[in-house]
Each structure stands twice: as C-alpha cells, then as structure tokens.
Amino acid sequence: MKTDMSTADLSPTPTVARPRFAFIDLARGIALLAMFVFHFTYDLAYFELIDVDTPLEPGWHWFARSIAASFLTLVGVSLVLATRYGVNRQVHLNRHAYLKRLAMVAGAAALVTVGTWFAMPDSFIFFGILHQVALASVVALPFLWLPTLAVALAALIVFAVPNLAAHPVLDQSWLLWLGLAREVPASADFVPLFPWFGWVLTGIVLARLALPRLAQSRLASWRPRALPARVVVWGGRNSLLVYLLHQPLFIGALVLATQFAIARPSDERPFMQSCERSCMQEAHDAGACRAHCGCTVDAIKREDLWRKVLENALSPEERSRVSTLAKACFR
C-alpha cells in the first residue's frame, strides 16, 4: 500500500529536487513480497487446494500481523521523511502532495470496502490496512512536532490501551474501528486504530533515531542494479497500485485453475452433485458447498475408502469414519 510520502518531496526550497532513499522502497517492496506469500496461501486454502487454516494457525496468524506492523512502521518513517527538510528537525508539510496521497489511500480504502461488501458480505473489510493508513496519516501529524521521547511514550500507551479499556459502550458497531470492542468482528482484514497506530508512532521514533546516521552513510546513495532488486524497489514505490491489483490477479488465476486444470473425474460427479444439493439445502453458498464437497471426496480417497463408497460397500465403522471426514470439511 503506497503510504509513500517519501524523500521525493523533500528539499531546502520548493524548487529544488530532493533525493529519494531507495532502501525505503526496498523495505516496502520486501513487505509486499511477504504479503503475497500470505495472501496466496490464504487463497489456496480458501479454494481447498491446501489443508492450511491461515487465519487460525498461529504461525500464519503472527506472520500476517508482522507484515501489517512492517507496513505501518514504514508509514511513520515516510511521514518523517515527507515533513522534514532532509532529516533535520525543521518540520514542513507539502500540503498538495500530502492531500493528494491521502485522497488516493482513502479512495483505495473505500474501493476495498465496496468490493468486499459485494464479494464477501459476511466478512467484508470495513476497516483494514488501507483504512488504518489513511487515518494514521492524519492522526500522526501532531506527533511530528513532539519530542521523540513523547512520541515513544505515546506509542507505548497506544499498544497498551486495548488491554486496559473495556466498556460495553465500546462494543457498538460505529466504534468498532477503534479496536476496543470485547469481541473481534468478522472481517477479512481488520486493522483498527488501537493498537496498530502504535506501529506508526514507532516508525516516527525509528526514523528520527536512524535516518540522520543513514543519510550520511553509503546506504543513502544506494540504487538497485540487479533486475530482481529493481523490480522489488519499483513495487515498493508503487505499493498502492500493487496492493489493489494482487488479490484480483491471484483469485482470478485460481478460479481458472480450479475450472480447467483441476477438473474432477467422472466417477465423482454423482457424489458431488448429491453432496452439493444437501449442502445448499442448509442455506450454504454454492461455491462454498462445491469446495467442501471436494474436500470430502479428497479426504475419503486419502483414507482409501472411495471404491467402497462407489460400491455402497462401507461397513458401519467406515460409514462413521466417512461422516467424521465430511464434518471436518464442513467446519
């Protein structure tokens, strides 16, 4: 996601071109690559092509949280770069560039909400990573004029608030974006103000502490030479565009794969049709029923019971096993 208010907008005077730190784009591009890994794995699991529960499996859960934290930390770093003459203490906001980028991120967040509302109404994204970036880009502005120690203390408070604040009034739907409700709402991507804004403040602190030294090092003039590095840096520089396009491309490719490359044998059709009819009678979505019934067939075959299913020759114990497999797939 392009939160890039970067050194391309910095200069001692409005007419002087300012350098850009390519290593910041590289860091953002690496975060995008990590996001690709998570989202593609999530999509494979959604289409029942792999047996991994990415939202609940602890390793994948923390991997996703670390990706979000890295993006938001880079938001704080980019805000420091965008509002300073170089890396000194003088704060200056290029209002036109700032408002243009803010409008782009907020518009992209609205697009994600509308798109997921139609695609997945039960878990649409009402306050995801882009919503957090847009809000944080506004809320963080006063902190750019505060001492570094004050910003660090504020970050600690923001991280701690969700563990300290608990009141029924915070459970109301119009306050869910705060992240202080006692139950997490169903959403494909939920990145509320608390505690995630703490990572933006952390980025501000890190930028103030590290950038003065980095600006004087050889890293400041580094430019990618190898093609892979240039591609990653380009992605980091255009992260909003990449963010918006990657999931439609992934899902489109998997839809084509499941339609054409993974066609099921003819002997599975009667079972699949019967299973899908029973599933949809319970008000399940047709696509979900198709995936779950396919999962059941695959599980039965792994247990070496498929031939007996076709011949209606299952013993009582085997029928119980098949029922257990089916229930596991429908969870």
Image: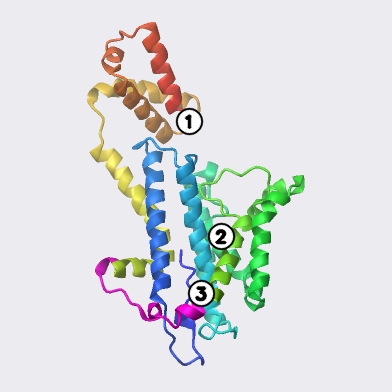
Q: CA distance from mark 1 to mark 2?
A: 30 Å
As displayed, is residue 81 above or below residue 297? below
Per the image, the residue denoted by label 3 is 210
Q: Position of residue 209 (x, y in %)?
A: 55, 74
Whether residue 30 appears in this view of the structure is yes
Q: CA distance from mark 1 to mark 3?
A: 53 Å
Per the image, the residue denoted by label 1 is 284
Residue occupying the point 39% across, 22% down: 275
Q: Nearer the viewer, residue 35 or 153?
A: 153
Q: Is disc 1 surrounded by few (<14), some (14 to 19) or many (20+) residues within 10 Å?
A: few
* SS state under label 3: helix
Q: Say which mark, if any, is on residue 196.
A: none
Q: Position of residue 148 (x, y in %)?
A: 63, 74
Q: CA distance from mark 3 to mark 2?
A: 27 Å
As displayed, is residue 11 above or below residue 4? below
The amino acid type, in three-letter code, at marker 2 is: His
Q: Position of residue 167 (x, y in %)?
A: 76, 47
First along the sequence among labels 3 and 2: 2
Which is in the foreground here, disc 1 or disc 3?
Answer: 3
Q: Which residues are magenta?
A: 211-228
As displayed, is residue 229 above or below residue 64? below
The amino acid type, in three-letter code, at marker 3 is: Ala
First along the sequence among labels 1 and 3: 3
Q: Say which mark, if any, is on residue 131.
A: 2
Residue occupying the point 67% across, 76% down: 146
* SS state under label 2: helix
Q: Nearer the viewer, residue 298 or 81?
A: 81
Q: Is disc 3 surrounded by few (<14), some (14 to 19) or many (20+) residues within 10 Å?
A: few
Residue 306 shown left or right of residue 92 in the figure: left
Q: Is disc 2 surrounded by few (<14), some (14 to 19) or many (20+) residues within 10 Å?
A: many
Residue 20 shown left or right of residue 253 in the figure: right
Q: Position of residue 70 (x, y in %)?
A: 49, 61
